[in-house]
Image (tube, helix red, strand yellow):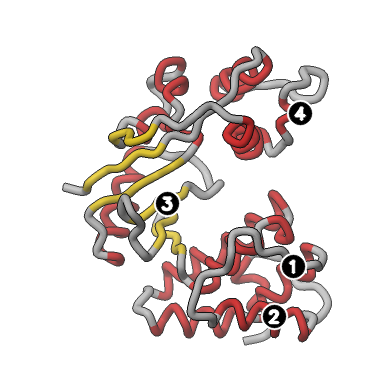
Amino acid sequence: MTDHDAAAIVGIEPAAEADLLLVAVLRELVHAAREPAEDLVISAAGDEIAMAMAALVPEAMARQRGIGIPEAVTLATLRDIGRKHRLYGAETVVPWLVGILRGDVIQVGRLQVERRAGAHGHALHIPESGALSPALVDDSLHRAAAITGAKTFSCESWLLDPRIGSAIPASNIAGFAARFCILDPGAASAEASAAVAKFVFRRSLSEVRDPAVVVPRSSLERLVASTLRGGEEWTSPLGVLTTP
């Protein structure tokens, strides 16, 4: 596989050859017995990290093939490297992207699912890749259950904040949230507010709170902006759902 092919798989523009020392550091993390620490930081530019991750695509594909992940799922999963790099910079989400290479998190249709079950089942994540329609969610849950053997899924996210269901009940996000039985409503916090600002606006919390910087356009954007500008904080509830 050429560097160009690998870069295309992860969704980045091929650049200079990957830094071999950086590739070696990432390779060790990919093949380690344990998942990387959440506070892992690598002192390198985002473009360099993304290119080094692309260099590890053949190894990542072999690893995921060896643990029974279908190739189509692996290819969809690896595209999150380019997506996250474009949106946030690979240097800001290294632990997550290493997990993508390892196959600790896989993308099954519209959703991402953690292969290993936690205390409340297999955790779900929602990639930044379009509408969250009920049909797509149904398909993803069905396929994820088939691949992982999961019967219970969990989600801890700003998407489950009850204000969405109250303000825009007909939205796809409200429909997604309604699938879950809330175990913990989550405390309103600056951390949750920063997360909703990041994922809805691709902006910092301080920027979203400034009307001169951010102009909301959709119903969701108006809800989030008015909440944060009104001095309220967002929440990240924890919910679970069981497949039929």
In the image, 8 versus 214, the foreground residue is 214
Q: Say which residue label 3 marks.
A: 111
Q: Residue 167 appears at what percent x and percent y?
A: 46, 15
Disc 4 vs disc 1: Cβ atoms closer than 8 Å?
no
- Secondary element at tag 2: helix
Residue 42 is labelled as 1
Residue type pointed to by label 2: Val
Which residue lies at the image location 66% right of the left edge and 75% below the top edge? 54
Q: Is residue 228 left or right of residue 188?
A: right
* Category of crowding for the residue at label 2, using alpha-carbon neighbours closer than 10 angstroms: few (below 14), some (14–19), many (at least 20): few
In the image, 1 versus 244, the foreground residue is 244
Question: How far apart in space, not on screen, are marks 2 and 3 (Cα)?
Answer: 29 Å
Q: Say which residue label 4 marks.
A: 206
Residue type pointed to by label 3: Leu
User: Which numbered disc flags the more N-terminal residue, 4 or 2?
Assistant: 2
Question: How far apart in space, not on screen, are marks 2 and 1 (Cα)?
Answer: 9 Å
Residue 144 is labelled as none
